[in-house]
Amino acid sequence: MTFGLISTIIVFILLLIIGIPISLVLAITSLSYLFLTDNLTLLATVPQKMFSGMDNFGLLAIPLFMLAGELMNFGGITTRLIQFAKVLIGHFKGGLAYVSIIANMFLASILGSANAQAAMMSKVMVPEMEKEGYSREFSSALTLASSVVAPVIPPSMLFIIYGTLTGASIGDLFIAGIIPGILLGIGFIIVIGIMNVKENFPRSERGTLKEIFKSFFYVLPALLIPFIIIYGILSGIFTPTESAAVACIIAVIIGFSYKQLKAKYLPEILLNTVVNTATITFLIVTANLFGYIIAYERIPQLMAESMLSISENPLVFLLLVNILLLLLGTVLDGIAALIILVPVLAPLLVTYQINPVHFGVIVTINLTIGLLTPPVGTGLFIVSSVAKVKIESLVKAIMPFLITTVIILMIITYWESAVLWLPGLYK
């Protein structure tokens, strides 16, 4: 290993330690490498590499799904979903905790972003649960944990990015994420059921049959959105990218029909969409440049040789990858880690004969766990800030859910049929 490369690694670690935003860390580290290794001739290719990372039609789905999420939030769909779940199961012991999980699973089929969902649901569910008698720490931990299903249940921004990086079908990834997302939700429900034995969780009043039907009628248009998206992709009516545009159109129609989405909200909606899209786009651009540096140093080939020297068994390879991603997820943002590591790991899939769609679901679930783990778990900071809870208390409260997600990850890793449940996904 050369002095320049060692110096570059030190720069990368130092920038992470002092808390520089990950997108800037990647950009500064990449440029530092060129200067420290005296590869200044490569500077001319930097703009080209940065642009090529964005030159993909599939990435257009990201701003469109973000716009759909904003439209649905302002259109009152979020509150109607929660109200429907509450009248349906709120009367059980710990009912509002179950409501939080189910509402997050519904929203996951609309938003596709764990951070956006965690922020949104923290504003709505934490005060509501605290008013019902739940502790603020538990309410915050449950809301954050439930949000990890957002990148797994379609649509998913991580699936879109993974698909553009590997060439795997984004539509296949969307379909493959359905059962793993449901398993995560069931896992959290089981945790609440176990905690119900020891904790004196409250229950809401039982909703009347009239209230249930009324709430169902109001929320039905919103419930149809994920089914329209999935059916449209499966039937070939539209592509995953086009489905995001369809979701926006439906969100506008539903929002105005509920009489909660108003024209005066549109500037704020568009501004939020632009800011969030710009943040992710800049991260993708800088991560692509960083990936170019990694490829130039032949790190994928070196890693492949190292992996093969340890074992040629694909099950052992998947275990090693999970450990690597779980560790890196504690210090790297999920999207950044995805863009950095997938080009390194993707060539090994052919060697170990692993289905790229299955691998994409494993990687996505693994990296979403990073949202819950210190020291860089962005979900922890978002919920801590929104819900006004100390990070230390939140980390302690989220441990049962964190352990559950790791168990589900292991199940998904070694139970291939849970991911490739549709015959057409085996390719």
Image (cartoon, grey):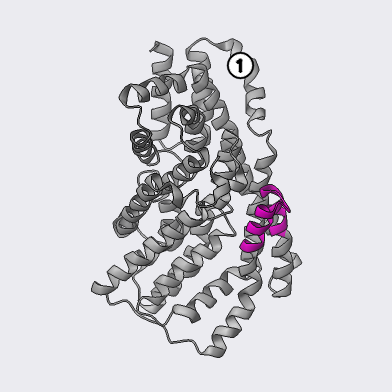
Magenta span: 226-248
Along the line of sight, the residue nearer the viewer: 422 or 161? 422
Q: Is residue 218 above or below residue 100?
A: below
Can you give x and y, in whole percent of width and height, for residue 11 in the image? Answer: 42, 24
Amino acid type for the residue under numbered disc 1: Leu
Q: Quadrant of the N terminus?
A: top left
* Residue 201 in which image quadrant: bottom left
Left or right relative to 58: residue 23: left
Q: Is residue 147 above or below residue 331?
A: below
Can you give x and y, in whole percent of width and height, for residue 235 in the image? Answer: 69, 54
Can you name the residue that lies furthest to the right here? 263
Q: Residue at x 47, y 17 (%)?
A: 298
Q: Quadrant of the C terminus?
A: top right
Along the line of sight, the residue nearer the viewer: 149 or 281? 149
Residue ID for mark 1:
43
The count of marks equals 1
Q: Secondary structure at mark 1?
A: helix
Can you name the residue that lies furthest to the front here? 423
Residue 236 in magenta?
yes
Left or right relative to 119: residue 51: right
Q: Is residue 227 above or below residue 341?
A: below
Along the line of sight, the residue nearer the viewer: 129 or 408? 408
- Crowd tier of the residue under label 1, counting other residues whose Cα lies within 10 Å: few below 14, some 14–19, many 20 or above: few
Can you give x and y, in whole percent of width and height, for residue 164 in the image? Answer: 61, 37
